[in-house]
Image: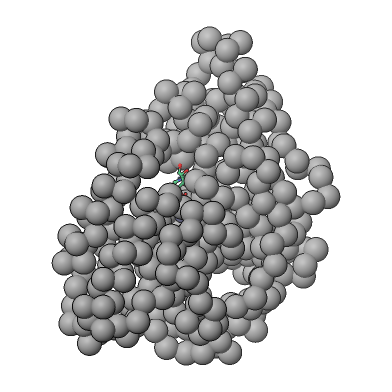
Amino acid sequence: MEAGGNLKSLPKFKILKEAVASQIEVHRPFGGVVPMLAKREHQRNLPILLKQVARNSSDFDLIAVTVGPGLEPALWQGVEFAKELGKKLKKPVLGVNHLHGHLYSFLPPSKTKPKLEPRSLFPAVALIVSGGHTILLSVQDLTAWKKLGETRDDAAGEAFDKVARLLRLPYPGGPEIEKLSRKVPANWSDHINFPRPMLGTKDYDFSFSGLKTAVLYYLRDHKDAEPALVARAFSDAALDVLIQKTIRAGKATGAKAVFLSGGVAANKTLRERLGKEAKKLGMKFLVAEPKYNTDNAVMIAAAGYVTYLRKKRYKLSAKGDLSI
Ligand code: KG4
Ligand code: ZN
């Protein structure tokens, strides 16, 4: 990735080459990510990916690698691989926070993105929704933010995955729930009343485990329940909380823009609904195209560049519980 600019203007990125090695098929039979399989797959895939994207080493100045948060054995593989590559090519290696990757995922080019100017974006409110995290941030500029709230139990993506399992849908559950629920017309699932946990609380925290349990009890008590209706009712409940709390945070902090990111941001209904609510209030809405919402290297390169400018340095070792 090539980047230019400084923090007074938004950096411009050009993707020279990109590749993703998905492990979904490997983990699917187990219904979730198996840590040691993930480590093995990283070890196997990293050299293959490098060959796919390798260009002249004079094309880049810096190697960015995720140091956390995430599964430590898998992170370790990536960090060691990057360190060795850096030594071989005589390039500096920079540790990157995975969550900053999501946060900055809207920066790389996309066909639909409007011309961006920091003045019209900040302060912003950012919702990061992935398999491991649900975080709401107030973002002052590209280098400064404050956590407003986060989930107290399951992450939003985790809730989608767990409910999908209850409905006997394959892993990962998020896209499966979305596919099913989009088949259901509005109002058809209104008779299923799932809770909207913590919707009314004054803070910006979330909770999804009670909602998952409500789905479990509903399925136990309604053996002939139509899976698509349950998927729609669950999705409506989960998205209502995410959208309403994000908009409330945006209003309270005087946000000029809403950033949405993380694997769950690939959800079309969430993108459409949150985008509509933000625009109603005159806030810009920024979200990367779906392939940059689920984990990818482009977002890590973007975060690497911003980390470099921020002069913030992480230790080059895997840290599974690294916070934003
Ligand atoms: O960011 P990500 O790729 O990996 C983590 O860092 O966790 O997020 C993966 C999560 C999974 O829980 C997956 O089910 C969810 O994102 N996800 C979705 C959709 N696509 C992926 N959730 C809801 N709707 C989707 N379309
Ligand atoms: Zn992620």
| Image quadrant assignment for residue 155 | top right
> Viewer-proximal residue, 152 or 185?
152
Specify whether residue 123 is in view: yes
The count of marks equals: 0
| Image quadrant assignment for residue 318 | bottom left
Please say which color scheme the image uses: one colour
For this view, does 9 lie left or right of residue 210? left
Residue shown at the point (72%, 37%) measured from the top left? 197
Q: Quadrant of the C terminus?
A: bottom right
Specify whether residue 24 is in view: no
Residue shown at the point (83%, 50%) measured from the top left? 202
Residue shown at the point (55%, 36%) measured from the top left? 159
Q: Quadrant of the N terminus?
A: bottom left
> Viewer-proximal residue, 6 or 310?
310
> Viewer-proximal residue, 157 or 48?
48
Residue shown at the point (69%, 62%) measured from the top left? 147
Residue 31 horizontal/vertical position (percent): 38, 31
Residue 128 horizontal/vertical position (percent): 57, 56
Residue 46 horizontal/vertical position (percent): 24, 60
Residue 281 lies, with reference to residue 234, above or below; the image says below
> Viewer-proximal residue, 320 or 244?
320
| Image quadrant assignment for residue 62 | bottom left
Residue 250 lies, with reference to residue 142, above or below; the image says above
Residue 115 lies, with reference to residue 157, above or below; the image says below
Residue 166 horizontal/vertical position (percent): 49, 23
